[in-house]
C-alpha cells in the first residue's frame, strides 16, 4: 500500500466510525443516541452484537494501519514516531473493546485504555510542533482540550453523578469519540498534504539539477 493510501485511512476511519455508528444505532428499535452509548449497540443480547463486533474490529484494524502509516511517514522525514505509537494504542484498544462486548469486565478495561490514544493530539502538538504548519499545531492543542473535556464528562458520573442529566450521556460519549476521530481525519489530510509538497519539491529539485 502506498504512503498516500495508508495515510488516507485516517479520514476513511473517521468517516466509517461516525457514519457506521449512527447507521447501526438507527437499526435498533428504541435505541437513543442521546442517552445510550455506542457500546450498547453491540452489547450482549443485542441483535447487532456480531455486526458491531465486526465493525469495531474493522475500525481497530484501520486505526492500526493508519498508525503504521504515520510511523513510516515520521521515519521518512526523521520526525518523532511517538504520535504514531499513541494512535497504534488506540487501535489495539478498539480491538479489545470489540472482542469483549459490554457488560464484560474487560470491555471497561479496554475502554479506559483508549484514554492513552486520546492523548495523541497532545503528543502531536509536543513532538511535531510546527512541522505540519502553525494551524495544525494549534488545532492539535484545541482538539486535546476538547478531548480532556470529553474525558472529564465521560468519567464524571463516577464521582459527580449530578453534574449533568445522565439521559444525555450518549451525546457526551459521542462528543469525545467524534472529536477524536475527526482529529485523526485532520492528521490524515495534513500528512498527505505534506507528502505531496515534499514530492513536488523533489521533482522541482530534480528538474533544476
Image: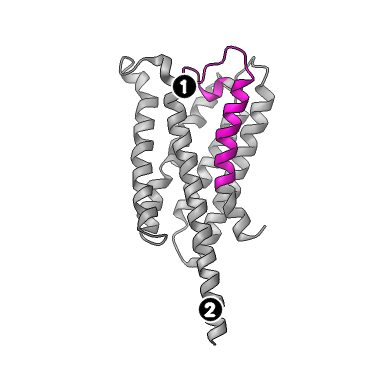
Identify the residue under disc 1: 170
Tell me which residue sits at (42%, 18%) in the image. 168
> Is residue 189 found inside the magenta-colored segment of the image?
no
> Does the image show residue 185?
yes
Q: Nearer the viewer, residue 172 or 114?
A: 172
Image mark for residue 109: none
Q: Which of 207 and 106 is in front in this view?
A: 207
Tell me which residue sits at (62%, 17%) in the image. 28
Measure the C-alpha gap from mark 1 to mark 2: 51 Å
Relative to residue 190, is residue 161 depicted above or below? above
Q: Report the span colored magenta.
A: 11-40
The answer to whether marks 1 and 2 mark residues whose Cβ atoms lie closer than 8 Å is no
The image quarter in which residue 145 lies: top left
86 relative position to 127: left or right: right
Image mark for residue 204: 2
Q: Position of residue 123 (x, y in %)?
A: 39, 50
Q: Main secondary structure of the magenta part?
A: helix
Mark 1 or mark 2: which comes first in sequence? 1
Amino acid at each position: 500500500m502506498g504512503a498516500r493510501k495508508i495515510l488516507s485511512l485516517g479520514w476513511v476511519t473517521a468517516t466509517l466510525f461516525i457514519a457506521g455508528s449512527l447507521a447501526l444505532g438507527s437499526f435498533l428499535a428504541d435505541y437513543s443516541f442521546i442517552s445510550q452509548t455506542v457500546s450498547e449497540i453491540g452489547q450482549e443480547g443485542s441483535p447487532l452484537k456480531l455486526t458491531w463486533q465486526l465493525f469495531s474490529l474493522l475500525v481497530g484494524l484501520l486505526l492500526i494501519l493508519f498508525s503504521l502509516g504515520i510511523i513510516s511517514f515520521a521515519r521518512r522525514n526523521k520526525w518523532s514516531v511517538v504520535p504514531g505509537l499513541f494512535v497504534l494504542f488506540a487501535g489495539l484498544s478498539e480491538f479489545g473493546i470489540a472482542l469483549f462486548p459490554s457488560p464484560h469486565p474487560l470491555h471497561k478495561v479496554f475502554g479506559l485504555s483508549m484514554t492513552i490514544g486520546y492523548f495523541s493530539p497532545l503528543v502531536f502538538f509536543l513532538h511535531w510542533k510546527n512541522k505540519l504548519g502553525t494551524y495544525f499545531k494549534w488545532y492539535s492543542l484545541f482538539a486535546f482540550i476538547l478531548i480532556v473535556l470529553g474525558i472529564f464528562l465521560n468519567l464524571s458520573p463516577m464521582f459527580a453523578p449530578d453534574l449533568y442529566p445522565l439521559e444525555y450521556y450518549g451525546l457526551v460519549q459521542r462528543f469525545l469519540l467524534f472529536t477524536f476521530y475527526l482529529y485523526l481525519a485532520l492528521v490524515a489530510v495534513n500528512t498527505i498534504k505534506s507528502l505531496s509538497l515534499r514530492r513536488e519539491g523533489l521533482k522541482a529539485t530534480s528538474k533544476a539539477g
